Image: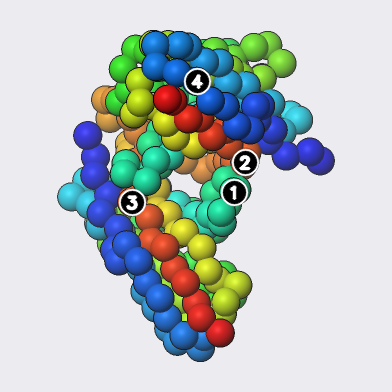
Amino acid sequence: TQLLEQSPQFLSIQEGENLTVYCNSSSVFSSLQWYRQEPGEGPVLLVTVVTGGEVKKLKRLTFQFGDARKDSSLHITAAQPGDTGLYLCAGVSPEETSGSRLTFGEGTQLTVNP
Amino acid sequence: KAGVTQTPRYLIKTRGQQVTLSCSPISGHRSVSWYQQTPGQGLQFLFEYFSETQRNKGNFPGRFSGRQFSNSRSEMNVSTLELGDSALYLCASSLAYFLLGEETQYFGPGTRLLVL
């Protein structure tokens, strides 16, 4: 079973601060996704990274996939209250993997205070 | 375009009962995946169906089963409910087989199941 460790679990910061969320594993993933989930709703996909070393930017959010495709990070610049939510990373294991091929991190509950 | 819909939204059952949850994917989507979300275990993958066939299964006991119909709608069944089955059950749909890695999946709002 593949494991994906996400840290930190909880983060409470002031508006305007920067933050980074990490997802780490000893397993190689063929792709990794980041989601944001708000109370009472299902997760919403933010980005998919596929290539080792890939960096993708979505406005103030920067996503990076590790060179070995075992880890990823999400960096938010100048956080705003609207960024508040549960951030989840999810790794898709290669096709030859037995068992479940989709693994989620535990999630990071981010609160941005005005 | 309507999003993914799940019914019912809330459900209360007692131990030993069984439950069936329903998911209608976005029109044109052929893949449906199911997930369980709990405070302790987080979000866990249950299974994915594509073209009425189960393509991948998570690490859950056989009490959890599902099926997909020719119109892509899907149902998930949990038999002999246990207290630990209390969770938010999420369904997601995508155009094609999601675990090929390039597809975007869209989640529904979930069914919150409470087992007493």
Residue under numbered circle 1? A40
Q: Amino acid at mark 1?
A: Gly
Residue under numbered circle 4? B13
Residue under numbered circle 2? B109
Q: Cα distance, mark 2 to mark 4?
A: 20 Å
The chain holding disc 2 is B
Residue A99 is left or right of residue A77, and the answer is left
Q: Cα distance, mark 2 to mark 3?
A: 19 Å
Q: Cα distance, mark 4 to mark 3?
A: 27 Å
Are marks 4 and 3 in one subunit? no
Q: Earlier in the sequence, mark 3 or mark 1?
A: 1
Indicate the quadrant where residue A38 lies: bottom right
Viewer-nearest residue: B51 or B58:
B58
Indicate the quadrant where residue B85 lies: top left
Residue at the left extreme, as displayed: A26
Residue A56 is left or right of residue A108, and the answer is right
Q: Secondary structure at mark 4?
A: strand
Residue at the bottom extreme, as displayed: A16
Relative vertical location of residue B73 with respect to residue B112 in this rendering, above or below: above
Q: Cα distance, mark 1 to mark 2?
A: 7 Å
